[in-house]
Image (spheres, rainbow, N blue to C red):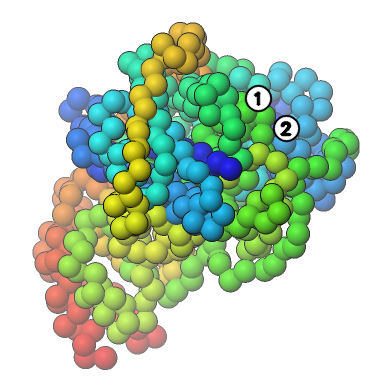
Amino acid sequence: MKIITLVKVVPKEIEFDKESKRIKRSKENIINPSDLIAIGNAVELKNKYGFEIDAVSMAPVEAKDTLLKLFDFGIDRIFLLTDPAFANSDVFATSNVLSRFILNFDNDFNFIFTGNYSSDGLTGLLPGEVASKLSILYISNVLSVNYLDGSLLAEKIEKDSLHLLKVLSKAVVSFSDRSDKKALPNLYYIFDENEKHLEIITNETLKLSQDEIGKIGSKTVVNELFEVETVQSNELIKENGDKIIVDIVSKEVLK
Amino acid sequence: MKALVVYKTELPDIDYLKGIFTDIKVANIDGNANGDFLPSKPLETSIQGVEFLSKIKNILDFDVIIFSNEILPKEIASYFASNNNLASISHVSGIEVKDNLSFIVYSWKNLGLKIASKTKPTVIIANLKPFSGDYPNGDKEIIEVKDESDIEFVRTKEINFTSEIKSKITIGVGLGVSKELLNSIFELADKISAKVVCTRPVADLGYFPYDRIVGDTGSTLHTDIYIALGISGAQQHLNSVQAEKIIAVNKDPSAPIFSKAQIKINEKVEDILPGVIEWAKSF
């Protein structure tokens, strides 16, 4: 029994450089916080029912050190899909890479878990696109999961309702931030002496054509980056801000 | 140009779209509201959604298929786009028409993007305000949809999670607030009966639970006074702030929140907070 977790490595900080009009990403990377929630839920099923957990990530090769930390959380195998040809892929091209790997090399999974959003893009589109390419169910905004008699039980939040779903087939499940099962490093896994591998997979293995990946394989083009309108400096209050806040808030409090 | 709008309960602003598209059709996935295309039963999964949409005659002739920013429509949007090799763009706050269509997406802090599509139609998830009028009955074409065989709905219950936060006074915490100030902020909030919310990056750092996020990926805030501390003012946060008055405190004079705030205080949060707390202690 296997769960694949889709993991994104994201920059710790992102800034927009006004002069070069380019996005500056910090050198320090982290695991996408929403994906840690998916991993937390996967590890709970591993501990209860013995699932194996694979982590699959498409990222530059520099992400390797960040991904290696996932072994401490309870991940069994890590696959880093990396190739210069994957650079500048939008969500469509990225889902081509992930789904090709899963279909050809890791297809004996039961479920795919991932976060609802990545903190650097927030598009939330990737899980559905991967599910579509694998022709399996997609369920988003899941609060918690359990496993019973070969089926996944998933609690899905939709507006002010909580649906309990019994999932009878393979599925991509993306988790709500409201789930309280964020993965943490675990001493048991940190000191686990079983040999663990991070495997690097390039396009030599995946054999995707140029029109499926990268800029050419993408379906969208960013034509322009622009700055949101800001105010003139003379409109700004430069001192006594505390007194102004007190004046406004005290009137409201005394109402 | 032609657009198809797909929604569950929150129809995006049709009046805005009429300024761009000459022909607009509407599909309601619950099947119980006005629309031109309705499923034979309320849709429950993305696969049913793709089946429903694929049975709409000439659906690929639309220039844009616009999905509301709701859970199931978003699921269907990504699944349908990938299934049909179409471009998909989320968080679209505006559409610009020049030679081609550009989709405007607001990103971190003061960054905006104009994104073009290589496909027709383009699938977008729109962050437009809800349509306030009644959409006309339309043709109400009923489209037969099969039951989903791979999923069983065991039960549904109402939950206390609310997608709306209401408070007379609210303090918002952004990345411009250091961790050391958080206790003081909660102390202040307690004294003035304010709620404390945050932006998504602050929750990602683990300083706040995720249910305190206000923004496109969190809750909507309704408040009289919003004291935004160290919040840059990304559109994805401000879209969900409904405040009579915004007091913004930020040391960065170019922070976009100043263009939305009525009171624009260009000081460090740590410089103004002690004075406000001192006053609040008198309560």
Please name the residue that numbered disc 2 is placed on. Answer: B50
Q: Report the amino acid beneath label 2.
A: Val
Q: Is there CB contact under 8 Å for labels 1 and 2?
A: yes
Q: Nearer the viewer, residue B147 or A151?
A: A151
* Residue displayed at 49% across by 60% down: A178
Task: Give the residue at x 35% y 24%.
Answer: A200
Instruction: Name the residue at 14% across, 77% down.
Output: B275
Q: Position of residue B60 (x, y in %)?
A: 71, 20
Viewer-side residue, B38 vs B54? B54
Q: Amino acid at mark 1?
A: Asn
* Mark 1 secondary-structure assignment: helix
Label 2 neighbour load within 10 Å: few <14, some 14-19, many 20+: many
Relative placement, left or right, of A93 versus B19 is left
Residue at x 60%, y 22% (from the top left corner): B86
As drawn, the label of residue B83 is 1
The image shows residue A231, relative to residue B164, as above or below, that is above
